[in-house]
Image: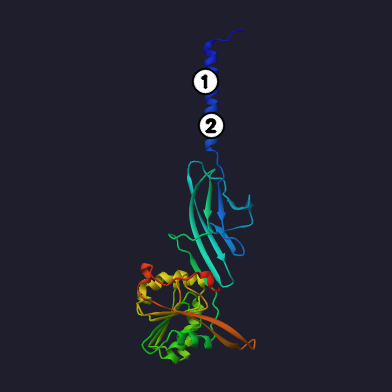
Amino acid sequence: MLTSRPTIFAAFIVLLVGFATNAANAQDKKAQATIKLLIPELPTKTFLKVDGKDVDVAATKDGDRMFITPPLEPGTTTKYKIEAKIVPNNYTEIFRIRNVVIKAGEELTVDLAKKDGKIKDDVRVRWVPTPESVVRDMCELAKIGKEDIVMDPGCGDAIMIITAVRDYKAMKGKGTDIDQDRVKESQKSVEMAGLKDKITIQEGNALKLTAEDLGDVTVLMLYMGNELNSRLRPLIWEHMKPGSRIVSHRFIMDDWKPDKTIKVTHEDEFEESLEEFTLHVWSVTGKEKMGIYPKIDPETIDE
């Protein structure tokens, strides 16, 4: 039997419509997306969250950490908040956040291993008290006297500020701490020392200090870790006046060379042994914000 041309043409049209329908259905079908997460190399520990939910950092594909999204609507974008808590040592926690936008079927790489100059990390350190004998050495190194206003931006138990005001006759002391319990403890210590009229303690983040916080400070006392010191440095250069001093127990200021570094030895009252402490002091000249300052290789100083 012969088939007429109109019949063949109609069958062809049906076939084309079928192909178009299948293509449209394929486009309308939901699909997963893949986010490749680059994290710092070991021995640093990293904990990941995507939209508030923990991600197994051991889940890998070809050695990379992966997050596979649920099936996403085609043709639309979906936002995800990625949070990394990076623990480079037993006293520092670095919080790094990235917000990403992705489409169904896409693969996106998010680098959490490196800092981003536009998106600042939050850094927190575990409080470890500085022995009072070491605090005295810090006061001597910074040459604290009656005209000084002293600040500790992670004051813990306030021993640094109390010692500077009580024993070295600093005119005024200021302290902040991100931990409310530490703030209360410091305020109590200040009250017990009879220095409420000279020392103020308040809750605050060391990385958010302003000109109002630092503008009148002549001596900054630190024991906060290399990472936090590095992040604090631009605030020091911006807000502290020439002639101000920064004295740090153990930790450095990135590649800013100290005016002086000393080692002191004291008896550990618990271990009944001698322990060595390293102290550094810097002076603000006003040229630092222009990139003019003595530089060192940070790797030459022990962390």
Residue 27 lies, in percent from the top left, at 52, 36
User: Quarter of the image holding residue 41?
Assistant: bottom right
Q: Nearer the viewer, residue 132 or 157?
A: 132
In the image, what residue occupies the spot 51% across and 72% down?
226
Q: Is residue 120 above or below residue 35?
A: below
Question: Could you tell me which secondary element the residue under label 1 belongs to?
Answer: helix
| Mark 1 in CB contact with mark 2 (< 8 angstroms) | no
* Residue at the image position 49 percent from the left and 77 percent from the top: 180
Nearest the camera: 265 or 44?
A: 265
The local crowd at label 1, few if under 14, some if 14 to 19, many if 20 or more residues have their Cα within 10 Å, is: few
Q: Residue at x 48, y 64 (%)?
A: 121
Q: In the rendered view, does 273 fall on the left or right side of 107?
A: right
Q: Which image quarter: residue 273?
A: bottom right
| Up-down relation of residue 23 to residue 49 (above or below) | above
What residue did someone put label 1 on?
Answer: 13
SS class, disc 2:
helix
Residue 156 tag number: none
**Residue name at image x 38 percent, y 90 percent:** 146
Image label count: 2
Pick the quarter of the image with the C terminus.
bottom right
Which x, y percent locates residue 54?
59, 59
Disc 2 residue type (three-letter) = Ala
**Mark 2 neighbour class, 10 Å CA radius: few under 14, some 14 to 19, many 20 or more:** few
Answer yes or no: is residue 205 visible.
no
Q: Calculate the distance from the C-alpha at mark 1 to the C-alpha at mark 2.
A: 15 Å
Q: Position of residue 39 (x, y in %)?
A: 57, 58
The part of the image, by quadrant, that contains residue 259 is bottom left
Which residue corresponds to mark 2? 23
Image quadrant in which the N terminus is located:
top right
Image location (x, y in percent) of residue 302? 55, 74
User: Type of residue at label 1?
Assistant: Ile
Could you tell which of marks 1 and 2 lies nearer the N-terminus?
A: 1
